[in-house]
Image (spheres, grey):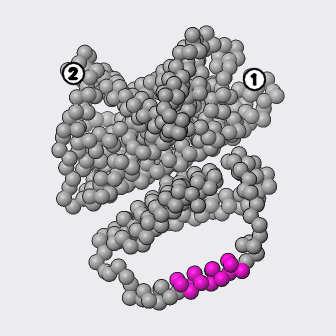
Amino acid sequence: MTAGFVVIALLTIAAGVAAMSLRHLIHCSLALVAAFIGLAAAYLHLGAQFVGFAQVLVYVGAVSILVVFAILLTRGGEDRSERLFSGSWVAGIATAVAVLGVLVWAVSRSAAVRREVSEPAEVTVRQIGDLLMTRFVLPLEVIGLLLTAALIGAVIIAMHEREGRK
Amino acid sequence: MAEAVDQIFVAAKHWLVSLAPEAWQPWVSVLLSIAALMVVFGTLFAVTTVLERKGLGRIQNRFGPNRVGPFGILQPLADGIKALVKEDIVPRVADRVVHFLAPVVMIIPPFLALAVLPFGRNMTFVEFDAAILFFFAVGASMELAVFMAGWSSRNKYSLLGAMRAIAQMISYEIPLILSSVSVIMIVGSLSPGEIVAVQAGYTNGLPNWHLLTPWGIAGFVLFMIAATAESNRSPFDLPEGESEIVAGYYIEYSGFKFALFFLGEYLGLFAVSGLGITLFLGGWHAPFAFLGFLPSWFWFFAKLFALISVFIWVRGTLPRLRQDQLMNFAWKFMLPMALVNLVAAAVWHFMAPLPVVARWVAVSLIVAGPYVMLGRELMVRKNLSKRTYRFAE
């Protein structure tokens, strides 16, 4: 644990807490973006350049815009007057603790923990690109097909409404 | 001698760093780089504002600023002082924190993006392998600053402007990245230094720039159009259309915050122009072999000024588009053409053993055929005819 990691981790956690506890939904989403940036910084700190930049490009650049658009297009953009905690907060915390317990139990018993940690190799973006185009080309194509289908589906949903009006 | 002038800034930095005590040297080096980046592009911003106002003035048959200093060249100084002493007005209902943060967030991404571009031989502030990916990643976070500014002002015009700006930036980011991908594909690297190195040298007296290939011409034109839209400049300046939504997302900003938005916009323009120079115009290489005695940084900034002049020229010439025209143009024309250009670049790469003329003819046809067909297809059912004006004639 280096000083850099501690700073990044604290900032990310603080942003995450802010995203949960701020009253205004837009503020929450902006705090969420700060948490995304913190995660990207953590990836870069670990030497994973590609994941770090992809995190910024996809989450900070695109997903955050999607989130704020969704909030603005629904009624969530207005100020909330309800309480910060919902009525079922006891049950919520109990569920969260139970899930955490199961996860900790499962992780501590898994073989991956006992395996010896080998020195991580220096992975460059070039190597990732090479592998994506050779060994993992089929998964890449499948994901591409899936995204294309999603895109066409979105266009069709948007088109249908317009035809109905005519 | 030419060598010394070429490396003068690198040598100066090394000398300054060597003055500092051993333990501080990495920090001094970083601080010097940051200071140089901010001073150079801050000055360039000042020069560009004068150039733009003068140039637009000439195009519109008037003088432009000519009161402060000789020929009005001290105008940015006066503007800066004015912006600093102006009252900073924040609307009463505005979201104060976000309203304050938006201009700050606005100017960070372009500075980060500029830091990875090679300005001359050995003159890249931060060098790493995936720099082009980094460039687009930080470029994408500009949209968030625009949203923050538009939303926090609690003004419907500013929110409308922000929505327009975000829709436009997301739409044109795709052709921008796709037209750059053709270069990345041909070079096989995401590092700007390597992309510039590939374009070194001359054949038959002409430079080996990517611009001088059929896919390079098409890619450069697509890149420049998308870059104009990305930096919200005329003819794509709907987000701040004065006649419709007053000033768009920064309508509620005054004083130096307004100046920061201006600065952010121009820095974005410099960054994207610098990327265009790196990808298509040979980076810091001289256009002809006999001009190679001029320093490398001179060529980079000469090309930058040339591109900025083109942007000013376009701004003074073309009228503003309409929102639906803007979106149709991005999705129905720019995107297919960028994809076609990608195929053209691949064909160019695989036709390497064939003679140059065959390559040129084949790849030009691949680009020109879809261009003509797409253009005709989009004109159908538009009923284009000469516009008649009821009161102006």
Q: Which residue is mark 2?
A: B68
Q: Is residue B77 above or below residue A97?
A: above
| Residue B234 visible, this angle | yes
The x and y percentages for residue A109 are: 72, 80
Label 2 Cα crowd, 10 Å radius (few <14 / some 14-19 / many 20+): few
Chain identity of mark 2: B
Report the front residue among B61 and B381. Answer: B61
Q: Is residue B82 above or below residue A34?
A: above
Please report the residue visible at 59 percent of the width from the left and 15 percent of the height from the top: B3
Q: Is disc 2 on the same chain as disc 1?
A: yes
The residue lying furthest to the right in this view is: B353
User: A30 and A166: which one is in front?
Assistant: A30
Q: Position of residue A100 (x, y in %)?
A: 57, 81
Circle number at residue A78: none
Quarter occupied by residue B64: top left
Residue B83 appears left or right of A14: left
Q: Looking at numbered disc 1 in the image, what kind of residue is underneath it?
A: Val
Residues B255 and A12: in front is A12
Identify the residue at horizontal 71%, vertical 26% (top origin). Answer: B360
- Specify the amino acid type for callout 2: Val
A100 in magenta: yes
Residue B356's label in the rendered image is: 1
For label 1, count other residues whose C-alpha is less than 10 Å away and answer few (under 14), some (14-19) or many (20+).
few
The reply to whether discs 1 and 2 touch (Cβ–Cβ < 8 Å) is no
| Label 1 chain ID | B
Quarter of the figure that contains the N terminus of chain B: top right
Q: Quadrant of the C terminus of chain B?
A: top left
Name the spot of residue A88 as percent of width and height, x first: 42, 89
Q: Secondary structure at mark 2?
A: loop
* Dominant secondary structure of the residues highlighted in magenta in the image: helix
CA–CA distance in space, label 1 to label 2: 54 Å
Pinpoint residue B354: horizontal percent, then vertical percent.
81, 27
